[in-house]
Image (cartoon, helix red, strand yellow):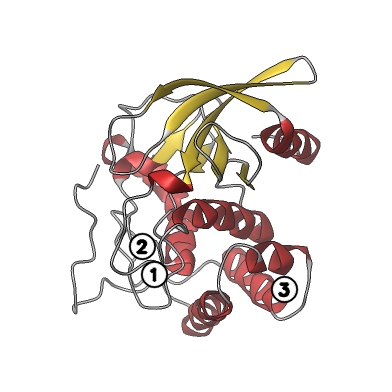
Amino acid sequence: MATMQNKEWILMALQKAKLDLQGQFLIGSNYTFMCNLTYESADLTAVYKPARGEQPLWDFPPGTLAKREVAAFWVSEALGWDLVPPTVYRQDELPLGPGSLQLYIDHDPEYHYFRFTEAEKQRLRPVALFDLLVNNADRKAGHILCDRQDHLWLIDHGVCFHTEDKLRTVVWDFAGEAIDKGLSDDLCTFTGDLQVTDEYRCHLEELLSRHEIGSLATRAQRLVESGFFPYPSGRRRPYPWPPV
């Protein structure tokens, strides 16, 4: 897990360093690239998602998925849960134009949710709450990573923050369970922060629409008021496809 000082340096590196494309991820419908960055004589590996490489979706405004990736990072930061790798949106001259840059997490791609032990799955309560909060329409098993220090990371948040209920996730382990007080307190603090023009609200206003931010605040408040992890909706498919 990065310290805040390291995280600030990483964010600066992602924002300022020149990109050297190394290759393209061929799995997925949107353009995604691995790239190297050098900043202050140090090297980083990052994932670059250019907005121009996004496939049009009928229910999300065009050209907004990369910004939603960044919004997910700032929600994770506001909650203090450290779930999303450092992510920025760059509009300067990049190889394929503006897009998101996210720190690459070194991990075993074969080790994902469906291979977690029951004890490991017990660590996923913040993950489940995070997806409920950001309204994640595509939480696949392979989007939950464990790094070499056994820290949990979440990736791929391009289809989040819709104003309508879109939640599709593989993590329904805690349905009907009471939300831990510590997590509930974090949600309360987050809800309050969204009501004022603080640092995180300012970041989100650059990335999401006013209605999307309002819906985010409403979802947080409903989770606090209910006090429980909800069950899957019976009105539509609650799981992503494919699930991994």
As drawn, is 152 to the left or to the right of 42?
left
Q: Residue furthest top?
A: 41
Q: Earlier in the sequence, mark 2 or mark 3?
A: 2
Q: Which residue is mark 3?
A: 193
How far apart marks 2 and 3 lie (CA) works out to 26 Å
Q: Earlier in the sequence, mark 1 or mark 3?
A: 1
Asked where in the image residue 29 lies, by quadrant, the reply is top left
Q: Which residue is mark 2?
A: 174
Tell me whether circle 2 and circle 1 mark residues in contact (CB < 8 Å): yes
Give the vertical position of 63 relative to 51 (above or below): below
How far apart marks 1 and 3 lie (CA) works out to 26 Å
As drawn, is 147 to the left or to the right of 113?
right
Closest to the observer, 20 or 170: 20
Closest to the observer, 23 or 213: 23
In percent of the image, x 19 and y 52: which residue is there?
A: 241
In percent of the image, x 35 and y 74: which residue is there?
A: 230
Q: Position of residue 94 (x, y in %)?
A: 58, 34
In percent of the image, x 30 and y 26: which residue is there?
A: 110
Q: Position of residue 46 (x, y in %)?
A: 55, 29
Q: Residues within 10 Å of mark 2 (few under 14, many from 20)?
A: some
Q: Which residue is mark 1?
A: 177
In percent of the image, x 22 and y 47: which residue is there?
A: 243
As drawn, is 83 to the left or to the right of 193?
left
Q: Amino acid at mark 3?
A: Asp
Q: Secondary structure at mark 3?
A: helix
